[in-house]
Amino acid sequence: MINSISRAETKALGVNQGLLEKLRIRFSAQLKSLLLEKGWLFFLVGFLLGRAIILSVVSPFAVAFLAGIWLIHREKAAKVMLAVLAGAISYSVTHGVFIMLAMTLFIFMAGIFKNFSKQQVLLPVFVFFSTVAPRLFIYSLWGQLSSYEWMLMLVEGVLGTVLVLIFMQSIPLLSPQRFKPALKNEEIVCLIILLASILTGTIGWEVYNASIEQIFSRYFVLLLSFVGGAAIGSTVGVVAGLILSLANVANLYQMSLLAFSGLLGGLLKEGNKVGVSIGLLVGTFLIAIYADVAGVIPSLTETSIAIVLFLITPSGWIKKLSRYIPGTTEHSNEQEQYLQKVRNVTAKRVEQFSDVFEALSKSFSSVEETDEDGINARRETDYFLSQVTEKTCQTCFMKERCWEQQFDKTYSLMENLKNDLADGKEPNHKSVRDFENHCVKNKKVMDTMKDEISFFEANKKLKKQVMESKRFVADQLQGVSEVMDDFANEILKEREHHEKQEMEIIDTLTNMGIALEKLDIYRLEKGNVDLEMTLSFYEYHGEGSKLIAPVLSDILNEMIIVKKEDVSPFPNGYCQLVFGSAKEYVVDTGIANAAKGGGLVSGDSYRTIELGEGKYAMAISDGMGNGTRANEESEETLRLLQQILHTGIPESVAIKSINSILSLRTTDEMYATLDLAVINLHNASVKFLKIGSTPSLIKRGDEIIKVEASNLPMGIIQEFDVDIVGEQLRSGDILIMMSDGILDGPKHIENIDMWLKRKIRNMQTDDPQEMADLILEEVVRTRGGAIEDDMTVIVAKVTKNSPQWTSIPVYADQAQ
């Protein structure tokens, strides 16, 4: 019963909290809409600036603020005028008349030049005249102007001109939608001046003898000291105190109070809100010593109310404000995110250029393989002899006997002569005598061959030069591609901040007596740890793998190994060690293959590929038919697969891309199958993608699991769906992948699947290479030693990774 009641209360509490959160969000949205979108914030500011007066009679704020609104939010100018006028009248009727005349004159001048392209240049001038002219008119009504009145009038006009420039930068900051990623120092000062000017409009307002302007000025000092530190806090105190003291000369000492409190609060910001509040209290007590005793209690009251307002200010508001103040943690995080985006975009663009250069390199590469040199030479010889015979044998009466009845002999004799001439020497005496006995126009043929050989050699040399030039360009483009690819990887490699782990690593290595000079942590993602250390050893004896890697494994809760060691050959030298995540599972592979008829070139191709992010891929491709052309098709398929998989593209997308390339690349009916298995070395899961390939087998103890899928070979159709078959492997499982030659090979066996499973189950070894050799041997034996088709077997054993050195608990001594 008690449990049911407690569960009901918990559920009700959760519902109430959710309701309160929804109400808070709705209230914030409505308040934001009311103040910013509907402009009530500008109306409130206009009302207070209409009341703002310094030096008893000077009021430069109202017209300057109206000028800023006219420039930035002209649609709100009329309502702002009414708010300013209302504030001015609330102070005094005379002041209201002056503000009304000044604003009217400004609107008149701004309206005349509203279509002027550089109106913002004229606005300060308009403000000066619209401030000075009404004041001159009012003073003239009272009689002749004194020198003091002339001075006040000019000061008011100049201050209004300066304030226009300040409000032009401050007014946009009142709209968070227009906030920049960071505020400049001058923008912060302009915003402080605007806030202090607004507070000037509250002079005379009190709550229990506590002045409103002093409460909020101290609140702003607390807030900005906590956000920006001592520099920002003291700046706020000086600016706000100066403007408020001009409004009320009796409060001149308040400038010292605010400035000192801002400095002290900024220095104590590490103590959070309480520390900053103590700074204001200390400043208040110290300045109160020099003030009247009667003013101590109101000053403490103002400070106490400001501290309460500061303490109840939501942390979310403070964090949002911190994002725009340079030097804060939030601003640094914002900058890092921006730099990360720029870095990612730059790296991606560099990688794209790298791919372009690599594609250009392949387009310049020679399409003629080394094993086709004989075919090309025979083709060139045929072309040369055709040129000679066209000029000699076409009109000969013995043409039919030579080229129809004795073609091979005639071709051989002329080819021998051509080879001798091509070497730059006179034809062999025996070759000449044999040709003279065979040809009735031997002299004419030989003369023609000598004439044509120069063109033949020149053409051959030119082709060779072109091929060398293309190869040179291809090598250069490939070099550029590799450099840009390395550069993209370096851009993406950034140092991350992991203070907790960094301090733990440093303390542990220090306690172990290892001199750590530098520690750079780049990534601490599970399964993708990347960190570098620079250490000093008198003599290095493998401490990286024996001591440091096990310690890191215990700290980071995963297996860490040494990826790279750069050891100094000198005593007390610096050693650079790179550590990374070890794979949870390792794959040991064995491969056996045989070409049709025992030849050297197989139509089957295979790859074992170490992919990033802890993946291991195995692939078999069987080109259509046998021999060189089938090998080219299968090799090209796997080459494209390897390049695309290394980019991180999903396997199914990669296979579709390869299929499109193969189907559009040539009109020849040459296709290739693909059998791909991708093993995740972190959890031993495997994905099979089979395109026209044979089933695979998984041996788990005495159990044999068959994995199969059906798709057409690649290159037949441009659009097709890739079926992905997933399996979960265990430590000790053996994966067997085969080409179709293995299953089609056994002769006089009715059920090949059962026969193959039985052979694999009865094998006394679990070594992958031995198993691959035995499977291939068993298939060949059933054919009496004949190899009727290309055969390929890949055997992979998945085992749990066992480190050479176990982890060392960091706090082992403390546990004892």
Image: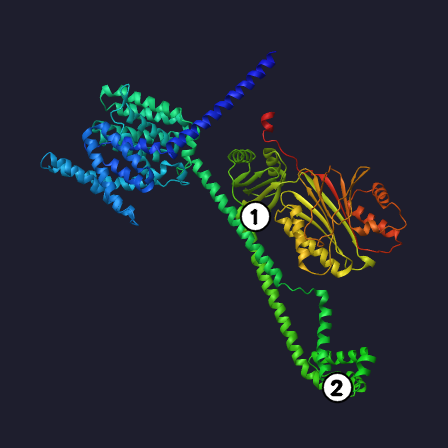
Q: Provide residue 468's location: percent of width, then percent of height.
A: 62, 68
Residue 116 as seen in the image, left or right of residue 732: left
Q: Provide residue 463's location: percent of width, then percent of height.
A: 64, 72
The kind of secondary structure element at disc 1 is: loop
| Disc 2 residue crowd, few under 14, some 14–19, many 20+, Cα 10 Å | few
Compare residues 400 and 277 and report the one nearer the observer: 400
- Can residue 558 be seen in this snapshot? yes
Q: Nearer the viewer, mark 1 or mark 2?
A: 2
Q: How many marks?
A: 2
Q: Residue at x 42, y 33 (%)?
A: 320
Among all residues in the image, which is located at the extreme top? 1
Q: Provide residue 560's location: percent of width, then percent of height.
A: 62, 39
Q: What residue does disc 1 label?
A: 568
Give the position of the C terminus as an image quadrant.
Answer: top right
Residue 729, picture quadrant = top right
Q: Amino acid at mark 1?
A: Ser
Q: Provide residue 604's location: percent of width, then percent of height.
A: 76, 54
- Can residue 186 be seen in this snapshot? no
Q: What residue does disc 2 label?
A: 395
Q: Amino acid at mark 2?
A: Thr
Residue 540, picture quadrant = top right
* Distance of label 1 from label 2 (alpha carbons): 82 Å
